[in-house]
Amino acid sequence: MLDRTDRKLLECLQRDATSSVADLAARVGLSTTPCWKRLKRLEEEGFVKARVALLDRAKLGLKVTVFVSIRTNQHDAAWLESFARAVSSLPEIVELHRMSGEVDYLMKVVVADVEGYDRFYKKLIKLVKLTDVSSAFAMEQIKYSTELPLDELA
């Protein structure tokens, strides 16, 4: 179970994973050693999956985000395994969700331009049989966050 200090520590890590243990300890009201022990426990228990750098997509030239809705008439384990293997090999897919409702899968794809999406699409349909693919291009990103709402845990 996470206590208030654990949640505060996770909150700080979400904002800046490069913070030193001393800085984190000061922000959560602990001394360095207990803070380090909590960090290690949170990592060992899987609350902290990884510490990563968030890159600027626009500066890298990856300016287009596409939400791809996929429908399939294949719902057996073999097809799902083939599909999972295929999409795992495509780095343009940054998120993939199995959905309830009319759409079976929803993926978020990041590419440089429309031509880049076309190349991605051709790779996708070559790798796996799909019944229906619908693409929606994001016009503007209004909110983006990697921070989880830890206040909801209280």
Image (spheres, rainbow, N blue to C red):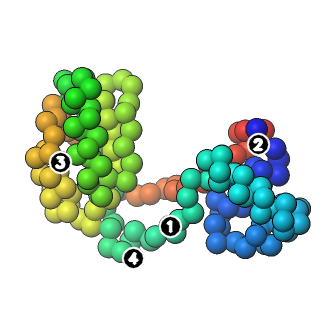
Residue at label 4?
Answer: 59
The disc labelled 2 sits on which kind of residue?
Leu
Q: What's the residue at 16%, 40% (across, down)? A: 128
The alpha-carbon separation of the residues under discs 4 and 1 comes to 12 Å
The alpha-carbon separation of the residues under discs 4 and 3 comes to 26 Å
Residue at label 3?
Answer: 124
Q: Nearer the viewer, mark 2 or mark 4?
A: 2
**Which of 105 and 115 lies nearest the eye of the viewer?**
105
**Which of 97 and 77 lies nearest the eye of the viewer?**
77
Q: Dot 1 surroundings within 10 Å: few (below 14), some, or many (20 or more)?
A: few
Name above or below for residue 56 compared with residue 140. Answer: below
Q: Nearer the viewer, mark 4 or mark 1?
A: 1
The alpha-carbon separation of the residues under discs 2 and 3 comes to 41 Å
The disc labelled 3 sits on which kind of residue?
Leu
Q: Dot 2 surroundings within 10 Å: few (below 14), some, or many (20 or more)?
A: few
The alpha-carbon separation of the residues under discs 2 and 4 comes to 37 Å
The alpha-carbon separation of the residues under discs 1 and 2 comes to 26 Å
The alpha-carbon separation of the residues under discs 1 and 3 comes to 26 Å
Instruction: Tell which circle, 4 or 1, labels the residue nearer the N-terminal end.
Output: 1
Left or right: 47 as drawn, with respect to 90 = right
Whether residue 67 can be seen here: no
Instruction: Tell which circle, 2 or 4, labels the residue nearer the N-terminal end.
Output: 2
Q: Nearer the viewer, mark 4 or mark 3?
A: 3
Instruction: Tell which circle, 4 or 3, labels the residue nearer the N-terminal end.
Output: 4
